[in-house]
Amino acid sequence: MVALTFNAAWNERGVAAVLTELRRRGHPATFFPTGGFAEARPAAVRAMGAEHGLGNHSHTHPYFDDLSTRERGREVRRADAAIRTAAGTDPLPFFRFPYSSTTTDSVADVNALGYAAIEFTVDTNGYLGPGRGMTVQRVIERAVAALAPGAIIQMHVGSSAADGIVLDAQALPRLLDAIAARGYGVVDLREFLVP
């Protein structure tokens, strides 16, 4: 079994395509929006939360190792409030560090706020876009190469690239075919973490 996760920080260009494909296949996923994303795009966060679990990806997407304990707490709490408001539901107690930038202290600070730090087995790097050397095929190859029982695949519903191409959304149907062809099922991330 593997779990699918999607970060949401830049734009919502891939949200509808991702949600449609997950719904069509009956697959769960966990979405990690930033608080800023939730404030700017509440309908997208509401749509994600209506069908899938929502985690916390900070409010402004800073490097957490550069922040004090107080600043980390402010980032997490502001994001939590924004996600709750946008989604109209309670988010999961899952936190994904921006840039995967963690230290022992930052993980302890997030844990003290009641969150499990959720990282990933592989990032597809689809958010980089074609302008930075990524393609749909490379997205799929990166994910497939990391398949193992309990793998957590990180994707994005938007793109940081100026062209706005959301490779993860484009790759998702073929990626799900490849996952199934290799004998893996897709489960809710919570199944890995809750007895």
Image (tube, grey):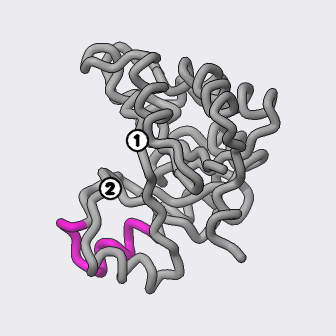
Q: Which residue is mark 2?
A: 100
Residue in the picture at 27% in, 59% down: 101
Q: Can residue 85 be found in the magenta stretch?
A: no
Q: As shown in the figure, which amino acid type bears the numbered disc 2?
A: Ser
Snapshot quadrant of residue 106? bottom left
Q: Reply above or below: 13 against 22.
A: above
Of the 4 image quadrants, the one containing the C terminus is: bottom right
Badge 2 marks a residue whose secondary structure is helix
- In the drawing, does residue 117 fall left or right of residue 100? right
Q: Which residue is mark 1?
A: 123
Snapshot quadrant of residue 163? top left
Residue in the picture at 63% in, 44% down: 45
- Crowding at dot 2, Cα within 10 Å, few <14 / some 14-19 / many 20+, comes out as few
What main secondary structure does the magenta stretch of the protein show?
helix
Query: Magenta segment, which residues?
Result: 65-76
- Number of numbered discs on residues: 2
**Is any atom of residue 39 visible in this view?**
no
Percent coordinates x, y for residue 160 in the rendering: 34, 29
Percent coordinates x, y for residue 127 in the rendering: 38, 30
Question: Cβ–Cβ below 8 Å for labels 1 and 2?
Answer: yes
- In the drawing, does residue 131 fall left or right of residue 144? left
Percent coordinates x, y for residue 178 in the rendering: 61, 26
